[in-house]
C-alpha cells in the first residue's frame, strides 16, 4: 500500500502510469513464463536425459512452490511492505531463470524451478495489492482491468512466445530472456516505486502453515500424477489423498485452537466475498482452465499445426482477452462488479455450450479461430469484476489476505481443472473408440482393408494398424466434444454463485 501521506488519488497520472507499468511488467513476466514453459517441456527429454514423466516435475515443482509461497505473502507484506517483497520476488525469479537456462540435468532445473515458483507467488500477490492501491476508489475496476491483462492475457500468449523462442533460439532462451527484464525492473522499482508504511507486526502461525503446506503439496502432486499412475488404482495416489485430507483437517483444528490463525476466516461471513471466491474457484479453475489447457492441444494434435502456428491460433482469442479486460474494469466502475460479472458469465456460458464443443478435425482453421473469440471476450470480462467484488468485500487491512486466497483457489482450482481435462479426454477417447468398434460391420471393414492392401501393396498387418491409428485419432477428435461439454457443465454450476450475488441474504429485523 501507499504511505499514509500519499493517497492514490493524489498521485499524478504520469506517476500512476509509471508505478503501474513497473509492477505489471513483473506480473506479466512471471505468469507468461508459466505457459511458455508448458510449451517447451516435451522438448526437454533429450537435453536433460529423462522421459516425459521426469520433465513433468519441472511443472509440478513450480506449481507446488508457488502455492506454498502464497501462504507466506500476507505475513511478508505486512512485515516488510509489498514494494520490497515484490522486488525480492523479481530478483529471485530472474536469478532462478538464469539457473534454469544454465541447467544440464533434471535435478538442477527442478531446484531452480522451486525458487521460480516461490518468487512468482511473491510477485503476483504484491503486484495485485500495489496496482489496486494506485487507483482512487472510483477507478478500482479500471485498476483490476489493467491487472487482468497480466493474469489472463499473458498465459494465453505463452504458447506463441514459447513456440517462437524455442523454434528460432532454442529452449534456453525461454529462461534467459527473463534475466535482463528482471534486472531492469529491480533497478526501476528501487528508484521509482513509492515508499510504504508497515501495517502491523503480525504473529506467524508456523504449525498451521506447515499443516496447510503438507496438505497442499499432497493434493497438487496427486492431481498432477493421477492420470499417469491410474488414479485410485495406484496406492501412491491413495496415500497422497489420505495425507491431503488429514492435513487439511489438522490444519482446521490448528486454526480453531490458535490465538493467531494463519487465515482469518471471518472474511467469509460476507456473502459477496464468499460467492466471489467460489466463482473464481469453480468458473475459472474448474472450467476456464480446462479450455486453456485443451485449446493448444486441439490445434496441435487435431488440426496438426506446428507449435508456433498453434500459438498464433491461440493468440487470436488472447488478443480479445487483452482488449476486453480494461473494458470490463471500466464497466465495473460504471455499472458495478456484480452486473459486469453476470454479463461475463452469460457470454462465457454461451461460448462454452454452443461454440467450443463443436471444434473438431473438420472445422476449418479460420472458423475455429473465430469460434474461440467469444471465449476470449468472456474470459477478458471475467477477471476484473470478480477481483473488484472480492477486494471491496474485504476490510482494507485484509486486502493482502483476500488476494492470497484468490490466488490460492486459482492455483488449486486450476490444478483440478487440468486434471479433469486430462482424465476426461482419456476417458472419452477410449469410450468413443470402443463405440466405433462396436458399431462396425466387421465383414465390410475386412473387405475394405483387403482392398487397401491390394491398392497400396502393403502387408495386411500394416494396413490394419494404419486403420486402427485412424480410429484412435477420430476417437480423440470426438473426445474433445465430450470434454468441452463437461467443462461447460462446471461453468453452469459456477453460475449459481453468480446468481447468488443478487440474492439478499440479510434477514429483515422484526
Image: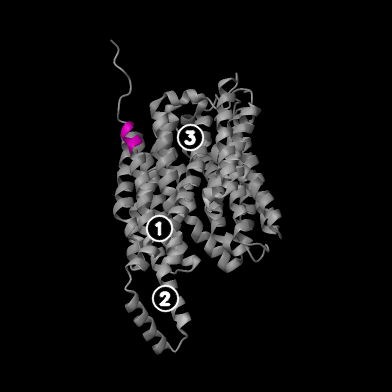
Say whether disc 3 or disc 1 marks the residue closer to the N-terminus.
Answer: 3
| Front residue of this view, candidates 51 and 303 | 51
Q: Secondary structure at mark 1?
A: helix
Q: Does 497 lie within the magenta span?
A: yes
Please name the residue that numbered disc 1 is placed on: 428
Q: Nearer the viewer, residue 442 or 36?
A: 442
Residue 453 on image: x %, y %: 41, 86
Q: Earlier in the sequence, mark 3 or mark 2?
A: 3
Magenta-colored span: 496-500
Q: Residue at x 64, y 23 (%)?
A: 203
Q: Position of residue 50 (x, y in %)?
A: 66, 62
Residue on which the image places disc 3: 132
From the top left corner, tell me how far across and down residue 69 is, in percent.
61, 38
Q: Is residue 446 above or below residue 170?
A: below
Q: Nearer the viewer, mark 3 or mark 2?
A: 2
* Number of residue marks: 3
Name the residue rendered at 46%, 86% in the picture: 458
Amino acid at each position: 500500500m501507499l504511505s499514509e501521506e500519499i493517497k492514490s488519488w493524489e498521485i499524478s497520472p504520469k506517476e500512476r502510469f509509471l508505478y503501474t507499468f513497473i509492477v505489471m511488467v513483473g506480473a506479466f513476466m512471471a505468469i507468461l513464463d508459466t505457459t511458455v514453459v508448458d510449451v517447451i517441456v516435451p522438448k526437454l527429454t533429450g537435453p536433460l536425459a529423462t522421459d516425459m514423466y521426469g520433465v513433468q516435475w519441472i511443472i509440478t515443482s513450480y506449481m507446488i512452490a508457488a502455492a506454498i509461497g502464497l501462504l507466506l505473502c500476507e505475513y511478508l507484506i505486512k512485515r516488510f511492505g509489498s514494494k520490497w517483497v515484490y522486488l525480492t520476488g523479481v530478483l529471485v525469479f530472474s536469478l532462478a531463470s538464469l539457473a534454469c537456462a544454465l541447467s544440464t540435468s533434471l535435478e538442477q532445473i527442478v531446484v531452480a524451478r522451486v525458487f521460480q515458483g516461490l518468487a512468482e507467488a511473491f510477485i503476483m500477490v504484491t503486484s495485485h495489492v500495489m496496482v489496486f492501491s494506485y487507483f482512487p476508489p472510483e477507478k478500482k475496476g479500471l485498476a483490476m482491468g489493467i491487472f487482468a491483462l497480466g493474469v489472463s492475457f499473458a498465459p494465453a500468449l505463452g504458447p506463441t512466445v514459447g513456440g517462437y523462442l524455442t523454434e528460432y533460439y532454442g529452449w534456453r532462451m525461454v529462461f534467459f530472456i527473463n534475466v535482463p527484464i528482471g534486472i531492469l525492473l529491480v533497478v526501476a522499482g528501487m528508484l521509482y516505486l513509492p515508499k510504504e508504511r508497515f501495517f502491523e507486526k503480525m504473529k506467524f502461525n508456523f504449525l498451521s502453515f506447515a499443516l496447510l503446506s503438507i496438505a497442499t503439496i499432497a493434493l497438487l502432486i496427486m492431481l498432477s500424477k493421477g492420470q499417469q499412475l491410474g488414479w485410485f488404482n495406484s496406492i501412491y495416489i491413495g496415500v497422497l489423498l489420505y495425507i491431503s485430507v488429514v492435513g487439511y483437517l489438522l490444519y482446521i483444528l490448528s486454526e480453531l485452537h490458535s490465538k493467531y490463525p494463519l487465515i482469518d476466516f471471518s472474511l467469509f461471513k460476507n456473502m459477496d466475498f464468499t460467492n466471489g471466491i467460489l466463482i473464481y474457484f469453480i468458473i475459472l479453475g474448474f472450467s476456464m482452465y480446462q479450455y486453456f489447457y485443451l485449446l493448444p492441444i486441439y490445434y496441435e494434435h487435431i488440426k496438426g499445426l506446428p507449435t508456433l502456428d498453434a500459438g498464433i491460433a491461440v493468440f487470436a482469442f488472447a488478443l480479445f482477452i487483452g482488449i476486453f479486460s480494461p473494458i470490463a474494469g471500466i464497466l465495473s466502475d460504471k455499472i458495478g462488479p456484480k452486473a459486469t460479472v453476470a454479463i461475463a458469465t452469460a457470454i462465457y456460458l454461451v461460448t462454452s455450450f454452443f461454440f467450443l464443443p463443436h471444434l473438431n478435425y473438420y472445422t476449418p482453421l479460420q472458423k475455429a479461430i473465430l469460434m474461440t473469440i467469444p471465449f476470449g471476450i468472456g474470459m477478458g470480462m471475467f477477471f476484473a469484476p470478480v477481483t473488484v467484488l472480492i477486494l471491496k468485500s474485504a476490510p482494507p487491512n485484509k486486502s493482502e489476505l483476500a488476494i492470497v486466497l484468490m490466488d490460492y483457489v486459482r492455483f488449486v482450482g486450476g490444478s483440478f481443472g487440468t486434471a479433469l481435462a486430462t482424465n476426461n479426454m482419456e476417458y472419452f477417447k477410449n469410450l468413443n473408440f470402443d463405440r466405433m468398434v462396436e458399431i462396425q460391420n466387421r465383414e465390410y471393414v475386412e473387405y475394405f482393408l483387403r482392398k487397401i492392401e491390394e491398392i497400396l501393396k502393403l502387408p495386411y498387418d500394416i494396413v490394419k494398424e494404419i486403420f486402427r491409428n485412424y480410429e484412435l485419432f477420430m476417437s480423440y477428435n470426438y473426445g474433445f466434444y465430450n470434454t468441452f461439454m463437461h467443462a461447460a457443465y462446471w461453468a453452469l454450476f459456477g453460475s449459481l454463485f453468480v446468481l447468488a450475488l443478487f440474492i439478499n441474504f440479510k434477514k429483515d429485523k422484526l
